[in-house]
Amino acid sequence: SSRGKRMEKGDQEAAWFQGGDIESPSLEPHSPVTKRSVVGGSGVGGNAGGSGGADPVGLGFGEAGNKIAYQLAGQAYEAAKVQAGGFLNIYSNLDLFRPYFDVELTLVLRRLVYSLVPKATHEVGRGGGNPDLYGPTMLAFTLVAIALMGMKSSHMVLEEGTLIGAAFVVIFTYWLGVSVVLRFIAYLLSIDLGFVDLASLIGYGLFGYCITLSVHIFLPSFSLWVMLLFGGLSSITLGTFFFNILRGRGPGMSMGFAGGVAGVHFLFLVYLRAFYFSFLEDLRQFST
């Protein structure tokens, strides 16, 4: 009967909407059930997975949602690309300093000796070759360790990080700070000296500091004479270098500038000895 056919057709439609495996009913071409079958593929279940024309990728966001997802992915890619380019630029900039650390040990030893021998020359890389930063860097770290040893021997009650940080900041600020200031002055005076040249000169000048402060820790009775000898030679060597460079500018400028550089270099040694090792000296006087 017609009523039984309608009930059977309704049962098939209900099973199809619930995602069953029952074949879609053969209805009229323009019926709503037939349109769902063509568009979604499996009724409500197929429509949840994405409409074939509106969501070809199958992300489940719809056409507008997929465009937003593509835009976000593109922005994330561009940000990652810029960040990676920044890392590559940093590495390439650091790679520029690689040749200044590729130096023979014998050349470093010769330059350590030459840093205490005043000579009438304006050659930056004394001992042959170009100026290097390996020797000055090692001297700066050695001087930090010596200053830390002096503070620990004086039983200064400070945190460990404070001791190391104070010594590190003071030594490297002097070395790099003086190099930057001298580079600026050389630029104003049209002197052909780069930052690496000046950092190498000032850095090797720390060798006299290391000798003086080491003797002050282990042989305090000779510390004053050692400071005058090695600290004075190191300061005079730096002053002689700048005197020879500025000799053509007149005796007043050359002697004044050379004396200023030598004086600052020696006064910084006096500062280190008085500040970082005065506690050690007071402790020894109190014990005697």
Image: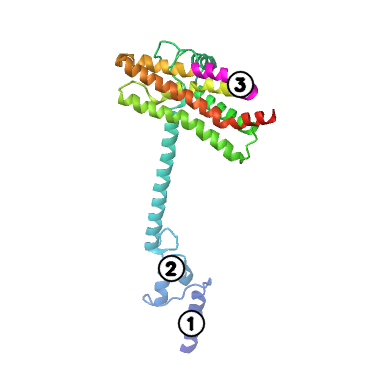
Q: Which residue is mark 1?
A: 10
Q: Position of residue 237 (x, y in %)?
A: 45, 16
The answer to whether residue 94 is left or right of residue 157 is left
Rendered residue at 47%/72% (across/down): 44
Describe the element under mark 3 as helix, strand or loop: helix
Amino acid type for the residue under numbered disc 2: Gly
Rendered residue at 63%/20% (across/down): 221
Q: Position of residue 123 (x, y in %)?
A: 40, 14
* Most foreground residue, 125 or 102: 125
Rendered residue at 67%/31% (across/down): 286
Q: Residue furthest right?
A: 288
Measured along the vertical axis of the image, is residue 72 above or below residue 251?
A: below
Amino acid type for the residue under numbered disc 3: Val
Q: Which mark is residue 215?
A: 3
Q: Residues within 10 Å of mark 3 (few under 14, many from 20)?
A: some
Q: Position of residue 273 (x, y in %)?
A: 55, 27
**Disc with the residue nearer the chain's start (3 vs 2):** 2
Describe the element under mark 2 as helix, strand or loop: helix
